[in-house]
Amino acid sequence: MAKRIPGAMDAAIASVQAGLSPGAKTLALRLQTFVQKTTRQIAQRILA
């Protein structure tokens, strides 16, 4: 699941990004970065 979340997040943001305001785009990119970092850390903990 941790391997699939970043890709799903990328797809979700890509599908709505065109309709977002500049501020919302910034928020979406920050959220994307946070989700990728967090899922990577969780996956490492699980596999450790």
Image (tube, rainbow, N blue to C red):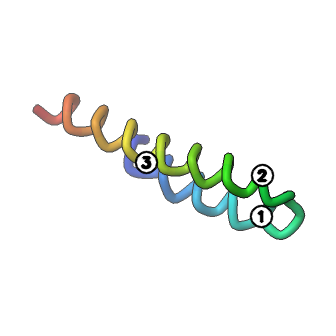
Residue tagged 1: 17
Q: CA distance from mark 3 to mark 1?
A: 17 Å
Q: Residues within 10 Å of mark 2 (few under 14, many from 20)?
A: few
Q: Residues within 10 Å of mark 3 (few under 14, many from 20)?
A: some
Q: Does residue 34 sit above or below 29 in this rendering?
A: above
Left or right: residue 41 compared with residue 22: left
Residue type beneath disc 2: Gly
Residue tagged 3: 36
Classify mark 2: helix, strand or loop. helix
Left or right: residue 3 compared with residue 12: left
Residue type beneath disc 1: Gln
Q: Quadrant of the N terminus?
A: top left
Residue 23: image tag: 2
Labels in figure, total: 3
Say which quarter of the image contains residue 47. top left
Say which quarter of the image contains residue 21. bottom right
Residue type beneath disc 3: Gln
Q: CA distance from mark 2 to mark 1?
A: 11 Å
Left or right: residue 9 compared with residue 37: right
Q: Earlier in the sequence, mark 3 or mark 1?
A: 1
Q: Nearer the viewer, residue 20 or 6?
A: 20
Residue 45: image tag: none
Q: Nearer the viewer, mark 2 or mark 1?
A: 2
Classify mark 1: helix, strand or loop. helix
Classify mark 3: helix, strand or loop. helix
Q: Earlier in the sequence, mark 2 or mark 1?
A: 1
Q: Which residue occupies 55% across, 50% down?
A: 32
Q: Which residue occupies 39% across, 36% down?
A: 38
Q: Earlier in the sequence, mark 2 or mark 3?
A: 2
Q: Quadrant of the C terminus?
A: top left
Q: Which residue occupies 77% across, 52% down?
A: 23
